[in-house]
Image (cartoon, grey):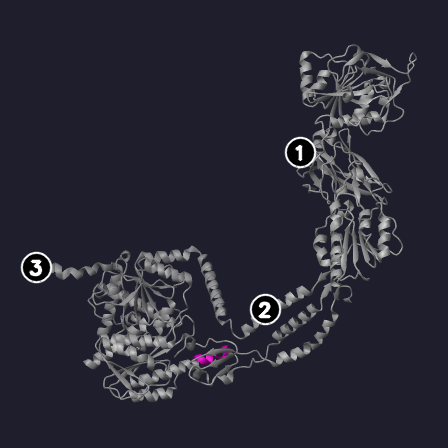
Amino acid sequence: MLSLAGILGFSQPWVLVALVALPGLWWLLRLLPPPPQRARFPAIALLEGLLERAESAARMPWWLLALRMLIAALVILALSDPVLAPQQRLRGKGPVVIVVDNGWAAGQDWQKRQTVLANILDEAQRSDRGILVLPTAMAATAADGISIKPASDWRAVAGAMRPHPWLTDRKTPLHLLANLSGPAESIWLTDGLETAGRMELAERLQRLGQLVVYTGQSDPMVLQEPLPANQGLRITAARAIATQPQTVEVLATAADGRTLASMSLPFAAGEKRAEASWQLPTGMVNQVQRLQLAGANHAGGTVLLDSRWAQRTVGLVSTGNARAGHPLLDPAHYIRSAFSGLAAFSEGEFETVLAANPSILVLRERLEPAPALAAKLDAWLASGGMLLRFASAGLSERPDTWLPVALRPLSRSLGGTLSWDAPQKMAAFPDTSPFAGLAIPADVTVKRQILAEPEPGLRDKTWASLADGTPLVTAQQRNGGWIVLVHVSPDTDWSTLPLSGLFLEMLGRLIWLSQGSPDFLIADQPLPPQRVLDGFGNLQDPTPDVRPLPARPTPALAPPSAVHPPGYYGNKQAPMAWNLAPALTETALAPISDWPGGVAVRSLDERRSQDLGAWLLLAALVLLLTDTVLSLWLRGHFRRSSTRAASFGIAAMMLATAATQAVKPANASDDLALKATMETHLAYVVTGDAGVDRTSAAGLNGLGKVLTARTTIEPGPAIPIDIESTELAFFPLIYWPIVPGQPDLSASAKERVSSFLEHGGTILFDTRDQDAGGVGGPGGARLRSLLAGVRIPPLQPIPGDHVLTRSFYLLRDFPGRWSGGPLWVETDAADSRDDVSGVIIGRNDWAAAWAMDADWRPLFPVYPGGQRQREFAYRFGVNLAMYVLTGNYKSDQVHVPDILKRLGQ
Amino acid sequence: MQFSGARSRQTKLDRASVLLFAMASLLLRSGERVGLLCADRTRMIGSGQLALDRLCEMLPEQLGAAGLPIAAELPRHATVLAFSDTWTPLDAWDRRLTQLAWPGVRGHVVQVIDPVEARLTMRGRVRVEGLEGEAPVLLRRAESLADAYSTRFAQHNDRMSAICRRLGWGFNRHLTDHPPLPLLLGLHEAISVDRRSVHA
């Protein structure tokens, strides 16, 4: 592989030689002009003689040439298999063994591990080497499918590989390697923590060939299970490397993901453990579902809590005979100091304490409650309370009913002055006891106890006993609550138990058992998994591999593994939190200190190397498409679409103009409306041709004078109309002369004209081209294109009996400046418009005939001429004005002959 | 004439045939006799509905012949209707129309062209091929010729128009994307005026 400064490398560098050929390609491309477009054209004769002026564009434009060279260069580069950020890790021959530590500690920088793993697979694939990936934390069944395969087969497996929330096991990979005989190259992505078999595995890999170890720089920090503390929790965190002071944030999270509280926990320099008490309100402690180290996204940073950690309240019923001033002689002192570190503790009269509804009610004396109180006590027991009783001298003599066992009337003294027996030691706790597993200190002795009446169930009720088998702690479940009797007094008179740490631990276990009474501590059934942690410390649904925990599990019995991952087990209502933390002892956190000689150690921090070949080919393809489009454009294939685009542009511009006109101040249009509606006005469309517009104005004003003189119509001065903007509705008749240069109408103007015609307006279109002769002169053509898109009703040449021929004068033809041109009217004018034709089209240039100066002298000659023609032009104007203002009124004359005939009869 | 500038449009020949039939039908209805000026001779067809049928039979074999019709000696007071794109050299037109228009014969030339002929809309490098065996022409940048072409086109039409005017004939242009009705109405009107003056 050829590599350029470690940034870009080429797997097939010899292909680059082809770049030398690019100048030749340049020359070749310059030589060949693009082929011309072919077109058939009948008027080819007209083209001859024009050709000398054509400019040469036969040469390919330089930018197109450059584009094609770029495409060629990109293809060559792509074929030489370039790699961005290449790294050469593999040097030897034979298969590559990749050991991946995917235990709990790998979660922290798992992304980097994946990147390195993918890079190695890429490289191995490029050099066609077999791969063996060995995860050190895996399910027992996963080992079966592991064999040497090509890198492409491993890619999916490697991509799906996840860290697991248990400890790495480096012995299994050692077994899997037993059959492999060198030479092979090995790479180990380690989590940096020591476990058994690590050194053996390293040496085994070294015997196969070169071993390279990639190690992360993170220093895993873990959270231990907290202990219940007074008003909160006692938090412990541990770390693998104790060099400098460090502060971590501990978050308490509720079941729904809310962060309830956070606390910072400082590690002192050189200390591997940090502890702190976390004061939390009782209600909040009970809501905490998990504790988490902020920023630690591995399973070791998460501790799940269950009902054992819920805050308990303990009530001590105090009798009045405390000996004030001598706390050590007060029998309640040991209870008080033991519980005050474990739970919220209160003390008072029996009634007061019971009313506070404690988890544990501690009683030193015999109990003789009033019936009402007894009922309350029963109800409290039924709600899951635990009544913890200690022995007293009077209890055995007059036992009450709130005892787990029947008592013998006398207490037993051991090791006293009058006794042969030595003080008794404690026996190991039975397995069924909640105290099971607690270590018994040798110095705990019992001098005096009260005895239980032997009975068949006594053994089951006994949670602790003395070496001779007599019970020390008995318990009975009643109404869902517990009654527990300690057969010694809570002070030092009867035993040394209250002085020992065991007393504290036993009370701690009782606290776990109280209130909510976790079934999992006592039940005999296995605990099915509910939710389990993944390698990043998130709760997931359990996979089928997960097996139920055995009844009353201990970390030694069921260490966290593929079958028992950390998580929640048991019933759904009060599951047991099964944590990784107890397994993370100091030895599990020990960092790897040394590797065998000859092992190269590298950092995980590296960039994902990227194959560029596909991207370069894609770029070349895109450029090739661009080239095709450009070539077609050069050959003129987009003529039509480009004109379409231009017309879109024009339409957009017109819309924009319309929009800007719409925001003009309303005054101008109001003035016009006022002026136009105070009296009747004739109007003409401004064409932009100044001469034509002057003629239109003079013509309409002249017609106005004639109308005023001869009829009752007395129009005001003619009003010019901008067809794009002026409101048309005020005008009964609009004169519209057509000039060749008139711009096309915008869509909105067309719509307005259509609407004007449909709602009773009349427009006289005058194409003014009768002089041009022939059929359909230039004005007619312009009119057709101008009105394309306006809703014009069907037209006909004016029939001889049309109302227009007799609305005032009787007319046969309609001359203007010219005579003889046809006049077109609507075929069937709608009833809604009183049969008035909205569109009247002619070509006689009437305005010029009507135009007169102030002295009533005509401005233009008429053709063929004569005063008679001008008079008839005026008569047409009068008829037209009458027609548009009175409608079909005169059409009644059709029946006049009939009426006269009848009258005559 | 066998040309259309867009798929959606008729060819010029089709449009010219439509116009010819329509005019023949109108004229026959008003009692005129019609004939067909062919390349070799004049075929008189006659009058009445049968004449239209005979025209239908006769016309297809005469269509598609390039060049101008024969300079036949026409009856007095005949009216000639010529539908053409007028791309035959103007000198030939001048000669032929002058030969046809001996005293008493009037006429109308209708130039039937496709809109793409009225304005040069080609762009880029174009190899232009004629329809009647003309030598192909290579345009290197067709868009640069548009203005010159328009001028050329206008000149051609002016000259054609002048030829017709000199003979007292009418000259009309018809584009194949326009509806034929206005032209037909105008032609009919114009011919009626002519005939009226003849019959008067």
Name the image quarter holding residue B158.
Answer: bottom left
Q: What span is in magenta?
A: B142-150
Q: Position of residue A544 (x, y in %)?
A: 68, 42
Position of residue A244 relative to residue A208, above or below, is above
Q: Work out whether residue A763 or residue A388 is closer to the camera in this orientation and state it.
A: A388
Q: Quadrant of the N terminus of chain B?
A: bottom left
Query: In front of the other: label 1 or label 3?
Result: 1
- Secondary structure under tag 3 reads helix
Query: Which residue does the numbered mark 3 point to in the structure image?
Result: A904
Name the image quarter holding residue A804.
Answer: bottom left
Q: Amino acid at mark 2?
A: Leu
What is the C-alpha distance between the residues marked 1 and 2? 62 Å
Report if residue A565 is visible in the image. no
Q: Work out whether residue B69 or residue A130 is closer to the camera in this orientation and state it.
A: A130
Position of residue A603 relative to residue A379, above or below, is below
Query: In front of the other: label 2 or label 3?
Result: 2
Q: Position of residue A778 (x, y in %)?
A: 36, 74
Query: Which residue does the numbered mark 1 point to in the structure image?
Result: A572
Q: Chain of mark 1?
A: A
What is the C-alpha distance between the residues marked 1 and 3? 114 Å
**Is residue B147 rendered magenta in the image?**
yes
Classified by dominant secondary structure, the portion drawn in magenta counts as: helix
Does label 3 lie on the same chain as label 1?
Answer: yes
